[in-house]
Amino acid sequence: MNSSPSLPWDIPADWPAPDADARALSARLIELIRTEIDQAQGFLDFARFMELALYAPGLGYYSAGARKFGAGGDFVTAPEVSPLFAQCIANSWVSVRRQLGGGDILELGAGSGAMAADLLAQLERLDQLPDRYCILERSADLRERQRLHLAQAVPQLLARVQWLDAPPTAAWRGLLVANEVLDALPVNLFHWHLDQVNELGVTWQGATFGPVERPAPEALRVLVESWAQQLEWRGDYRSECNLSLTPWLQSVTAQLDAGAALLIDCGYPRHEYYHPERAQGTLLCHYRHRAHADALLLPGLQDITAHVDFTAVAEAADHCGMTVSGFTTQGHFLIDAGIEQMLSDAQNHTAGDYLRIVTQAKTLLLPGEMGERFKCMLLTRALEPGIRGFGGRDLRGRL
């Protein structure tokens, strides 16, 4: 988060300007956040600001109606890059389903619906459909977009899809899939300097939002002090952490009697995440395919993310009674899940289609693209090893 505030609309001249409707929506969100700042006596912790900016009903980035995903949105996720991504996850599901003798798939935050449609289509081809395909989606707007996409792409399978308002309350078995979900969970920001730990928050500075600091609450202070000592920080160090990760994971896996959770996101093991040289954190915003670090700009009109501390995910899994059964890069996950065979089969397509498929695969696989930046973690409960995607490079030792 920038140390000097900018006006909410003070964006570079070469960025597409939001239209009047978008500005009006953002203005309403700004008033909502200002009210909370006033109620919090001038200091709103960043996690709450991020929660409102992304998820405030009808106003937050993921709750309002603007297009977010794909070439016409703000960023592109792996399912929009190529159906190969979902087809590889289909092979992971087949491994789980064979052990369980059936079960459900639960997708968290289904975005445009592209992965759900591609996954269901591939599983129909393999005769390996789940009993139910459940989507846990907070945004009413995204739900409708997902429903429309599925109705167009796989109309014969739409009846198998259910949208949930909250995590399952009854016991279930199967596979939970969360692709680029953890990076959008609200995080707390901190500033460490000479053994002093401050929490960074948001205040109102006359005409715009601005950053503000105060001594960190004890839970945050203890964490940061332990990391500073272990990793030998020097000078100023600013970063973020997700204090709600364990309760979040508990909420989405509590009723999973047997099965797996597949978590795919941009992130690092802790010793890399909080490396002394990564002293400005990982907070990143996306607006119309422009990436920048000012989370106070364009409230409700830009995505706000932070990389994932996968060591923290492993710790949360242990607390929730889940086993970390795999951790690898996205590239190695896709290779072990069968993408090379899929590319071989694609040679039967026309030359133009084959070139397009290979180009898409490179985006998913190459280290300079998504292949190394994104990691895949497999959490299991009452499940034996051998899930497709995690039989290759094993990075659990780095956690």
Image (spheres, rainbow, N blue to C red):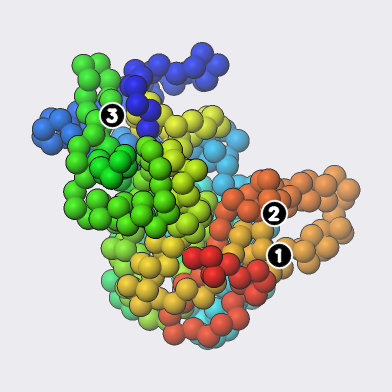
**For residue 313, what is the image quadrant?**
bottom left
Residue 211: mark in rendering: 3
**Does residue 54 lie above or below 332 as drawn?**
above
> What residue is disc 2 on?
365
Residue 285 point in image, percent of width and height: 45, 35
Distance between mark 3 and mark 1 Cα atoms? 44 Å
The residue that appears at 51% across and 13% down in the rendered structure is 13
Tell me the kind of residue under disc 1.
Ile
Q: Left of 193 or right of it: where is 32?
A: left
What is the three-letter code of the residue carrying label 3? Pro
Q: Residue at x 37, y 32 (%)?
A: 1
| Residue 80 x/y as whole percent | 60, 47
Does 227 appear above or below 95? Answer: above
Q: Which residue is mark 1?
A: 335
Residue appearing at x 33%, y 73% in the figure: 320
Nearer to us: label 3 or label 1: 3
The Cα atoms of the two marked residues, 1 and 2, are separated by 8 Å
Residue 141 visible, this angle: no
Q: Tell me the mark number nearer the camera, choosing from 2 and 3.
A: 3
Label 2 or label 3, whichever comes before in sequence order: 3
x and y percentages locating residue 151 in the rendered image: 53, 53
Classify mark 1: helix, strand or loop: helix
Pointers 3 and 1 in contact (C-beta within 8 Å): no
Q: Residues within 10 Å of mark 2 (few under 14, many from 20)?
A: many
Identify the amino acid type marked 2: Leu
Mark number, residue 271: none
Q: Tag 1: Cα neighbours inside 10 Å, few (<14), some, or many (≥20)?
A: many
The numbered mark, 3 or 1, whose residue comes first in the sequence reads 3
User: Pointer 2 and pointer 3: residues touching (CB < 8 Å)?
Assistant: no
